[in-house]
Structure formats: C-alpha cells, structure tokens
Image (cartoon, grey):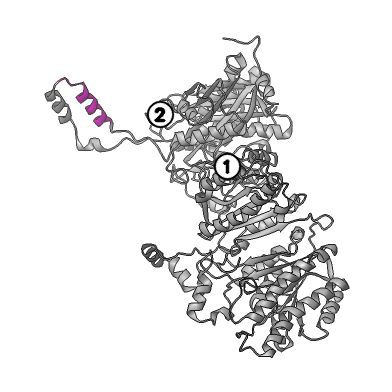
Amino acid sequence: MLSAAAPRRVAIIGGSRIPFARANTAYAELSNSDMLAGALQALVDRFDLHGQRLGEVVAGAVLKHARDINLTRECVFSTTLSHETPAYDIQQACGTGLEAAILVANKIALGQIDCGIAGGVDTVSDAPIALNDGLRKTLLRAGRARSVGGRIAAFGGARPSMLKPELPRNAEIRTGLSMGEHCELMARRWNIARADQDALAVASHRNLHAAYEAGYLNSLVVPFEGLSRDNNLRPDIDPGKIAAMKPVFDRRAGTLTAANSTPLTDGAAVVLLASEDWARERGLPILAYLRAGEAAAVDFVRGDEGLLMAPVHAVPRMLSKLGLSLQDFDFYEIHEAFAAQVLCTLAAWEDAEYARERLGLAEPPGAIDRAKMNMWGGSLATGHPFAATGGRILASLATMIDRRGSGRGLISVCAAAGQGVVAVIEK
Amino acid sequence: MSSGTPSGDRYLDFVNGPVGGLLAKRLGLPTPVRLVRNGDRAAKARPVLVGAAKGARLLSALAVNFAGQHVVSFYHHDAESWREAAEEHGLMSGRFGERSGRVGALVFDASGIETVDGLGALYRFFHDSIRAVCPNGRILVLSIPPESAGTAEAAAVQRGLEGFTRSLGKEARRAIAVQLIEVAPGAEAAIGSTLRFFLSPGSAYVSGQVVRIDAESGQYASGTTRRTVLVTGAAQGIGAAIAELFSARGDQVVVLDVPAMADKVAETATRLNGVGLPLDITAADAADAVLQHARSCGGFDVVVHNAGITRDRTIARMERAGWDEVMAVNLRAPLRITEKLLAGGGLRPNGRIVCVSSMSGIAGNPGQTNYALTKAALIGLVKRLAPAAREAGATINAVAPGFIETRMTAAIPFMVREAGRRLNAMGQGGRPVDVAEAIAWLADRDSYGVNGQTIRVCGQSLLGA
C-alpha cells in the first residue's frame, strides 16, 4: 500500500476545538454535527483551507444518532472546505479521536494522501434515545406482514410497557457494571488512596487554569456559543470541598467522586495532519511529528484485568518497537477518565510482578516524572466529550512541544470495552 | 451599588422588577435597562466582535491592547485581517457566526474607508452584528480625523461616521453605549486607555461621543507612583465622588472646598486618607494659595475643576450678584488657577487638568444664562489652552455631565425631573460616579493623546449636539 517512494514523516500542523461544556449546559440544544462542524470550520479558518480539497476528514462520535450515518462527511458540507473532500466516521469509544489521527497519519506516511483532518465529537445532552426494542420489533414485524390481518396481528403483540424508550447507558454490555464501578475495582486492586485521586483532580484544574491564563490555549480553542473556556474548569477549586465529597459509584466504601471522575461533557476537537512537503508549500507551521501509534485491549470480562488497563499494555509494546524507555519523554498526556485510572496506570508500570506476569517484561517500565504529566490540565478539569478527547490531547501536546522548541511526548487514552490507544509525538 | 439595590429612580426599579417588567412589556412602556457599572456584580466577560474595512490601520494597535487583557474576540467574515492580527498577538479568536453567542462589544475599524462605496463594509458589519450585542454592551467605531484624510471624499466619509454612530447610539438601546474614536495618523499606539475605558463598565453613561486621540505619549510613558489629585468642590456631591474614585485607585487626593464647609472638608479628607484644603477659590489670592500648596507637595498630577454653583433666574429677573457669583466660582477661579499652575510649574510632568462643564453649556437651559455661559466658557478654555498644556507635557479636557442623580436634581419638580431623566438614549439619569469615571479616564497616565476636548456624560441626551 506504499504509494510514496518511502514512508514519510507526518506533521501535526495545528488543532481547533470548541470549549468543552458540561452536559446539559451551554451546548444542550446542539447536535454532534453542530459542534463538529464548528470545530472543523475553525480549523479551516485558521489555516486558510477555504475551498481546498483535503485527502480526507476522519472523525467519529461515541454517542451517535442512527441518522448520522455519514456524520463527518455531512459536516464537511457545512464548512468552507472543498465539498470534494472525502470523509468517514470511525468509532472506538474514547479512543476514537486518537485512532482517527493514527488512521489519517498512516495514509499520509504511506503517501496515499498528503493531508487530512482527524477528530471527534460527542454530546451527552443530545443523546440518542431509541425506540423500545419490543416496539421496534413489533413495527418491523408489521412492516413485513403481507395482509391487513397480519398487520393487525403484529400490532396485537404491542404492550404499554413498549412505550418506555431505550436510553443509552454508561455500562459495559458484558458485565453490566458502569465504567465508574469498574474503576472502583481497579482502585481497590491497586490500593489507590482517595487523597491521591483528589490531589490529581486539583492539579488538573490548576494546570488548566494556568494554561488559559498564560494564553497557551488561545491557538487551540475557539469561542463558541458563549463559552471561551471549558465550563467544567474551577479556577479556584477548593481541596477541602473536594475531600468532603461523597463517593458516587460505591457509596459505602468507594473512593471515586464527582470531582475525581470526569463529568459527562459535550464538545468537539479536530487536528490537521500533513506531509512535511504539503505544510512547507503552504508556509504552515509544523508543531510536531506523529511518530507512532498503538492500540491494545484486555479481557476484563473473564480475565483478571481492570477495564481501563489496556494502555498499560499498549505503551511498553509501542516503546519496545521504537527502542525508547518510559523515561525518554519530556511530556506525558495520560487521559484522566478517572484520577484512579491514571494512578492505576502509573502504579502498574512501576510494579515488577505485574510487569513479569502481565506485560511479559523482565523489568517494569518504571516511574515517570509527575511534573511532566498533563501540564496544561487533563480531562478531569477540561471535561471529556468521549471522541473529542484524542484530538484535544494531540493538538495540546504538539503545541507544548512546539513552544519548547523540541521534545517528545507520550499520549495514553483508555477506552470502554477494555481498550486503549497510545501514541508518541516528537520534534 | 449593586444592581439589585434601589437607584432612587422608581420607574427604573419598577420596570426592572418581575411585575413591572411584564407590565411595561404589555403596555409598550419604555423599559430602560439598569446600567452595569464598575463594582456591580462581576459581569461575565464576553467576547468582542471585530470588524474592519479594507485598509484598516488600527488592528495591530487593537490587538496589542487586547492581548494585555485576555480579550477573546470574533472576527466578521469581512475582517480576515483581524484573525491574522489576533493570531500574531496570541489572542483567542474565531469567526463570527450563528453559533458565536452574544458578544459584549463591537469594534469596527473604519480608518481605511476613503470612498462612498467603501462604506458598504460598515453597513455589512453592523447589519450582521448589532443584534448579537448583549445589554450594557459597547460599540466603538475607530476612524481618522476627517481633516487628515487625503481627499474631499475621504474627509466627508470619515466625518459621516459621526452621524452614523450617534444614530446607532439612539437605535441600540438596552444600555448599549456607542462612541466614535478618531485616531490621528501616528497616534495609533496611544489608544490603550481610551479603549479600556470605553469597553469597561466605567463608561456606562457615556454615549454618542466623538473622542480624538492625536498624540503619542512619547516620553510621558505610564508610571506607577502614587499621584496627587486636587479636586475643587470636593466636600460633597459629584466632587466627593470624584475624590473617592481617585482615592480608591490609590491616589492622594487634596479635598478643596469653601472654608464654610471646613468640617465637611476635614471629614471627607480623613475618610479618603487625603489632605483637606479649605479655601475660597474666588478670593483674590486663591490661585497663589493653590500654587503654594502644589509646590509644598511637589506639584499636582491631576487638577479637577469641579466647584460650581447655580443662581438660576431668567435674565430679566436675575440680580447682578447672582450673575457675578456664578462667573467668579464657575469661570474666573478655574481660569486663574489653571493659568497660575501652568505658568508656575504647579503641575508635574504628564499632568492632567479636567474641567467640569455641563450639558447646559452645550444645549442651553432657561434660567441658566449665567451658568450656561460659564460652562460653555470652560469648553472654550480647554480648547484654547490645549496646545500650551501639551507644551508643558500635560493635557486639559472637560467633561459635560447631563442629568446626574444628586441631591440637587432630587429637588427638581417631578415632571421636569422625569423629562431630564428619560430624554436620553439610556432612559435614565446618571450617577456622580459616572462623571468621576470619565474624569479618571481623561486623567489616566496613558490618556496623553486626548487633549482640548469636551466629553459629555449624559447617556446621549437628546438635548444639544
């Protein structure tokens, strides 16, 4: 599939996102299309891509309406990009945004395309509510019936209980447990203290606030629907109040609270990727290069592994291919689905027994310098519109590296159904 | 005063209440919006929508100023140049569209408009954006002094902006203030303090004004030392409000008022941690005494000629004494003191003189031939003394208050008072602090470019120009 003479480096040109909003607040009346088109148009404006035909636009949403079969392509029509730009949707839970970037980057590296946009969007406010499955089957059965009598017979099977709609649930299909309940199990397995989780949440808010105040995010965020900062951010977060909050997933003995877990959020983020030549021809900046990506999955159903532990496996696998150690990084972006998830990941990387038995490594990957982690805040403060988080992190990390002049960053994103997507970017 | 507290204007309170608001809407009664001033509930900082005509010269200066204040902006689709300027200065900005939400201000750079056709950009911008401005919003049009334009057409077009902004002020309502800011070529970098003031809650009651910025501050760059501010007639009323504001901003105030009010002078001075100066400014040696005081404290940084009296009578009924007293307090005293301070070095470098004129001096008022004469005279005075002041590294300007709610206006008969209150674009009276805020802007260390001008604090009154 190599369409160029040799694989090419993939440049990260820049990103755009709308401020993230807690569910049922600023974007309560908006759809995924509204938000994704908003972020896309901002990227097009910023890099003057009006009327240009790009290689492709790849994005997705975790919570999606049935009608959005071509969500991304429809959004292209809403922008000033050339309407001859192909697009497709992908879906890999919270890994969607980063996986989309890896897909676009691979095509650029292989020479199949010269440039593309990757991203994601999600809304919990405008969640799809489906017909009750019983009612749906009744309607389909009636549609298949050949005679009036057959139709009446089909409707005869209808029951009042079928009027109850089907709501999307934040639960694992195979275990019935919510993601928070799974993460409670992980926190218990790794002895993650409540105080450490709370401290991570406080740091997340403080770092994000400081980044906004310093203007670091001005090139990444566009004002939208009355917001110019993520409305989950608490600039003056009070550690005392955080410590007093009650656990939400295990009310008796749990450690996960509303403050050290990400809130349900609406938002969209996109990133522009290109070959070096394409960027240079247009005089566009190269923030950093996307060097490697890796996905992993764990069997949390039958296996004795935590739901959100896949990145722990993915990172060492990727690093061994690159000949890098976990300490060879200037920045770490570990997606904060829950503070406990981040802390479990870090603990597992330091555990020799776990490394031997689960990761198949003689030596554990080891500890990281926590001061280099989520320096501009993480998902706990920013919020986490599932598919949008990958694009947010990728563009922020590339900007950090660009501001520093050079450096290497690691991205780790955990996802539902025991998956994880990770990447390395550098300059 | 917070927005929830009574204003002394019962109608304003009524229509801003739950029942009154509904009633006024049903009956089609005018519904003035309560002005948001400095110190009121922290209003949410909203983005600024920027527009520009081709050839705009002020965008870079605008971006420099916005960058210092974390301003979030949108650009109108005609103004791609703002996107570039904003990006260059690290500002957050986005294209204005249906998903932009409400904005706090519109700023349009019209400095590049030289032809009648070029005015189309002005139409497009305001046609698209005026409804996006939230109540208590601000609209600024930036232009060049018409006489500095290259052609007759350009001069006419630039002068025409004055009619545009004044009409827009009357249309916008909802406590939205509109100004035209003329920036002379070469003075672009000096717009900071003026931009800040007219985009801030401090300018709530100033609308429909034309402000000219015609010089860079040059050697008179901003400093941070505590300034000494002389306010005449400062024992009570608007004068006390002026002294309070300067004091609150960290300046040392010199509270001057007549010896008969020595107690009040001392009280105000103590309260504001300032200095009391009981003095009859109409006395023959008053100017000398003021200069002497100035020298004793190393010179004044700011002098506010606020002291004023009324002796209202129609000219036929007016006694000579009433005429003479008004002349002495309102005109001769500020004239002599100013001359003395300028000539005698009583003003420190980058000094500021601000005279308190009046709407009466612009529009005229029955029964105030004497008062209006003196207040109009101050307008002439600042204009004439402006070059001399600048030579001394200072500025001299005037503010002309309209209907300001004070004890004096509370005594006016109801119907006359209602007319005074309502006949302006804000539909309400101003407060002493509104006058003080305008004076503080003119006295700002960075306002060196504003000189010889008279700015009305009248909510864009229907009376006068």
Residue A187: assigned label: none
Helix or strand or loop: what does disc 1 sit on?
loop
Q: Chain of mark 2?
A: A
Q: Report the quarter where the C terminus of chain B lies.
A: bottom right
Query: In the image, is residue B337 above or below residue B322?
Result: above
In front of the other: A124 or A356: A124
Residue A245 visible here:
yes
In depth, the one of A422 and B462 nearer the eye is B462
Look at mark 1 in the image and give the residue it sits on: B76
Chain letter, disc 1 residue = B
Q: Position of residue A221 (x, y in %)?
A: 59, 39
The residue at which mark 2 appears reads as A68
Q: Which residues are magenta?
A: A133-146
- Which quadrant of the structure image shows residue B447? bottom right
Classified by dominant secondary structure, the portion drawn in magenta counts as helix
Q: Amino acid at mark 2?
A: Asp
